[in-house]
Amino acid sequence: MRFSQVLCGTASAVVLAGLGATSVAQAQEADVQTVDSIIVTAQKREQNLQDVPVVVTAVGAKLLQDTGVKDIKDLTILTPGLTVTSTSSEASTTARVRGVGTVGDNPGLESSVGVVIDGVYRPRNGVGFGDLGEMERIEVLKGPQGTLFGKNTSAGVINVVTKEPEFGFGANAEVTMGNYDAKGVAASVTGPLMGDKLAGRLYVAARERDGYNDVIVGNGPSSRKQDADQNFYTVRGQLLFVPDDQATFRVIADYSRRDENCCGAVQIRTGPTAGILGLVSGGTALAPTANPFDRVAYSNRGAPAKIEDKGVSLQGDIDLPIGTLTSISAIRQWRTDNGQDGDFTTADITYRNKDGSNYSQFTTYSQELRLAGKSDKFDWMFGAFLADERLENRSNFLFGNQYEQYLGRLLSRSAANPAGVANFIALLLNRAPNTSFTPGQGLYDRYNQRATTVALFTNDTWHVTDAFEITAGLRYTAEKKELSTFQTNSDGGVGCGTALSPAGQARIAGIVGAALTPTIIGNLCLPWANPLFNGRGTDQERTDKEWSGTLKASYRFSPEVFTYASFARGYKGGGFNLDRTQSSNGLPSGGSGVTPIYDTSFPAEFVDSYELGMKNTLFNRTVLFNVSLFQQKFTDFQLNTFLGTSFVVRSIPEVTSKGVDADFMWFTPVRGLVVQSGFTYADTKYGKQPIPNDPGNALALLPGSNLSLAPKYSGSASVTYETPVGDNLKARFNIGAKYSSEYNTGSDLFPPKVQKAYTVVNGRVALGRDDDRWTVELWGQNLLNEKYMQVAFNGPLQGSSGLSATQNTYNAALDTITYNAFLGAPRTYGVTLRSKF
């Protein structure tokens, strides 16, 4: 039985389910143009989509190719309700489902939306941004999934299934060329290695592209004139061993490396501090008039990045008398080394140096065991998940050559002297210029975290009658996290230390007055300059032991109508903020306003999710129309936000998300023509309670507002048509579009960060032999060159908001911030030549 499944499994048609995308090509290859061909594995067993009480999008290999999907960010065009964004690095990629996800840039936070590749949980979303290789399908499951997937997640799972080795010889090759001087090659080969017992598959690819953004570097030291380029290669090898009809074993080893420059930011609004930046830089430091979609970034330091992802896994499936035992063992390592222009201007204010002292590295060992079986009345599964994740985080943040002068001018400027005084800090501290904040000095911090997870789970279905089923799932999770921190200032924090001394405070008060002294000292003692962190080592530990689970009831009224209701309790573990944070409550002579916060922990995140769905199979099973209503309530939602000087994690008491998911698919009477579309309405809001631990009211706009990057409306549509041309050719056409309504891109919800509604359109035209021996494809991504932001953020040390600390209101007339943004990709187009043997 096991051997026949391996040989014949690829004939099943795994096509779009859930929200509006479908791999119709597989159904066409099987010459079956009905909804019955849609098979999914959302419950860890093969089922027809219309029998599954779950909202799931499963996009098959052909549609992934037709729409140019190579990573999880590309997947958004096929999936309403899914938003994927990148910020300061492609490693900082975050997926959101129904408006809920984890804000990136802080490795201490796990992902609300988990990424699983070939059964192996990946520690952060950024691993899914790269060439995923030859894919069988990608499934997007919405809502808590802890009883079905190894690592519990609170908002959903993106499950990537790659093509396994085959026992018949086959080979593929492709060459791609496009605008921005894009070039790419990929090749794969599969076939038997030892009769009918051992088969292999090897995939290799390399891609490069010029940057989307032009860069003005000023006086350097960077000479890189482009940003957001692409340069990576990947190799993936697999072995499939089938010793007998009762067992299969699959070994996968892969390695990917990216050496790129990402991500510079453009100005979407330039504030009044631009004059001072220009003065200290000796030229134009940033866009004098913000025209973000000119795609010109200002950066004297650049954003070099190297990302490595490697690992090996072994999956075994063994048929036992009581059921099938599945074991998935994996060892993985993911590392990202980055440099960054910390101020996003040509002025040399702050930067992170890519010299081996600014990186994050995850080394993960995981083991999953599942035993599944079935009888006339029950389908059952019991499992265990073990993981040991070791995180090394090293960070530097350094003073540029003009930091001291810029900060001094900021602190001394007035209406009478808007440029300030160049050597004001030297005057305040009675030190020689550029010795209080010496260029090249700054923070060097180390964080070592170990997280161990032990979980037991079960997911079982009782077939009460032929029409009525009840599914129950339960999970117990025990997690322990241990964090060791050591923080240093390479210059000892001498500038701030001088200011904090009694003599320093008295001198500052004598120059600026007692009323302004706390403000001056607070700016001299920003986290990266604070000597109270220097030489500080801490050890923290937290343990979570939690129950979660699901309960579903489904009833089939007729062969055409299937309904279900479900409840799920989801959980995401707590953790530690891996950044410097300090008190901001006043600044008396004792300096309590700059006291480091020793407890950087945050609690676990929970969600209660309710769904009510109906799946309809109409018109002789050629039309699918599914709709579901959902309501989710998150408690202790983990919000990671940038406050202008550091990242902090706040536990939001309540977040709610409610709405509707709908999808439609039509195998039309015209042979080869398939239409699919999807729609999501998600009203995702913060509760009305004030945000705790927010003394500066930086998050005062959140209560009662929609979450950032959470469009209320999103929809997708795709039309695919394949037709014979002559005796031995065929043509294939695909056009797809994704619409997102207006949403705010900033975690603090400042109004200038709003992205207006937009639509992205992709298209592809292919002509080739009917046996796929060769194919020529013309393709375009973002054909209409839609202009949109991924994430907008405050320019560091560049102005203050118009947010009232007492009334919690925003006054645009008082907002002096320079706002920057990471942009979405522009229009790209090209040609791909494919060959299949």
Image: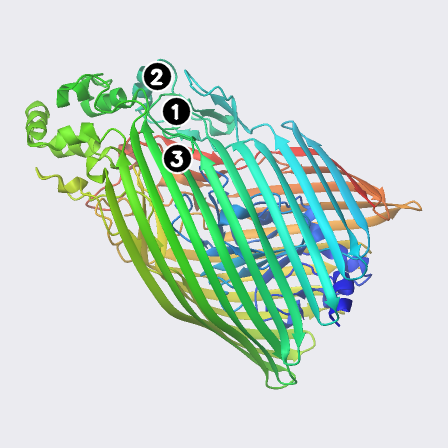
Question: Could you tell me residue 121's position as x and y percent?
Answer: 52, 57
Q: Which residue is mark 1?
A: 345
Residue type at tag 1: Thr
Q: Quadrant of the N terminus?
A: bottom right
Taking the spot 21% from the left edge, 24% from the top edge, the residue there is 436
Question: Could you tell me residue 836's position as x and y percent?
Answer: 81, 45
Q: Which residue is mark 2?
A: 281
Question: Could you tell me residue 319's position as x and y percent?
Answer: 67, 74
Left or right of 441 in this view: 592: left
Q: Is residue 163 visible in the rendered structure shown here?
A: no
Q: Secondary structure at mark 1?
A: loop
Q: Which residue is mark 3?
A: 357
Q: Give the mark nearest the N terminus, 2 or 1.
A: 2
Tell me if residue 708 comes above or below residue 155 in the rendering.
Answer: above
Of residues 112 and 676, the one nearer the viewer is 112
- CB atoms at circles 3 and 2 under 8 Å apart? no
Taking the spot 48% from the left edge, 57% from the top edge, the residue there is 682
Q: Secondary structure at mark 3?
A: loop
